[in-house]
Amino acid sequence: MAATPLVIDTDPGIDDALAILLALASPEVDLRLVTTTHGNVDLAQTTENALRVLHLAGRSDVPVAAGAAESLVYAQPERAGHVHGRTGLGGVDLPPSPAAVDPRPAVVALAELLLASETPVTVAAIGPWTNVALLLATYPEAAARIGRLVLMGGSAGRGGNVTAAAEFNVWADPEAAARVLGATVPTVLVGLDVTLPTVLDEGGIARFAAAGPVGATAAAILQQYLDHARSSYGTTGVVVHDALALTEAIAPGTLGTVRRDVVVDTTRGAGRGQTLVDRRTVSDSPTAVDVAETVDSPAAVEFLVSRLSDLAARRG
Ligand code: BDR
Ligand code: CA
């Protein structure tokens, strides 16, 4: 079967880097474009990181187009350097890519790709969803051609990870999130309900670290995440949220989903950035989204570890 064209919209970010490597390791998808956004660190750094991660995997041919430097309405309150390291990749200094940034703004590159593609494109948005909101507003005819939009973000019943109410990607730009979740694009929402129980432990990291230099570098990038998890939560594994979203993008149906109505709290109070998922009913509204509610976490972790090990072994 032909590989599904894939775009990753991202803010690398340690788990973003893993997600990009997972996509490159997966024959089911053909990564055609990476678009970058503000988020874990600032836009210049996420863009540089995206270029370097692709180069690490020997894929500097994949174009990288820079997108939104800020959220739609209010500036993102703070970055996440304390989680991802000052430069976003856990303090690991990857070699610079020979490739330059695509001169097109992210939404233009994305719209052109969507309009030109003969087969439906999957878009995985694993940073704040500002670029997706801008695409919906500026190129609705292109957005309508998204085959599947896989979003990492939000939470139905696990509370937040930045505030008591809000998950980071939604908290970073709630107005964009409201716009994206109010659209009629076929959408899967991969939130904290399924990512938090899916923990990559040190044994799994050691497996891909041993498979070759790319795996060893991925493991070095993860060290910052491990340190943060240990000091903040007392855990010995890491939650690679974005890699789980990519797993669902690569292998649709990995996660158990239910179609729900979801709204975003865009008020400026304590609930700002919360995703309110109506779990009372299954919805048939055109704006309902497939909310990921169940996951086989050991199988998802094994998928990630084996794919990254294969990639590392291939790159020797
Ligand atoms: C999300 O927040 C970011 O820090 C991660 O990269 C992920 O996309 C998890 O809440
Ligand atoms: Ca991210």
Image (cartoon, rainbow, N blue to C red):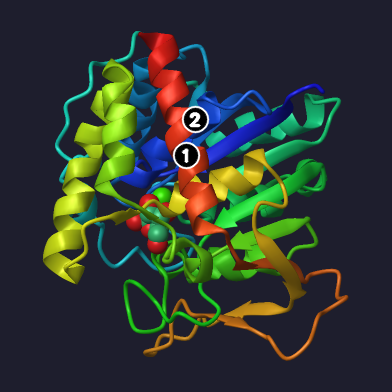
Secondary structure category for the residue under label 2: helix
Residue 111: image location, x then y, percent: 70, 35
The quadrant in which residue 260 appears is: bottom right
- Give me the residue at 22% from left, 50% from top: 225
Q: Say which residue label 1 marks.
A: 304
- Give me the residue at 46% from left, 14% from top: 59
Secondary structure category for the residue under label 1: helix
Q: Is residue 250 visible?
A: yes
Kindly check if marks 2 and 1 are in contact, taking CB atoms under 8 A apart as contact: yes
Q: Which mark is residue 183?
A: none
- Give me the residue at 15% from left, 61% from top: 230
The amino acid sitting under disc 1 is Leu
The amino acid sitting under disc 2 is Arg
Q: CA distance from mark 2 to mark 1?
A: 5 Å
Left or right of 184, for residue 265: left
Left or right of 229, for residue 122: right
Q: Say which residue label 2 marks.
A: 307
The quadrant in which residue 43 appears is: top left
Depicted 286 relative to depicted 28: above or below: below
Depicted 255 relative to depicted 274: above or below: above
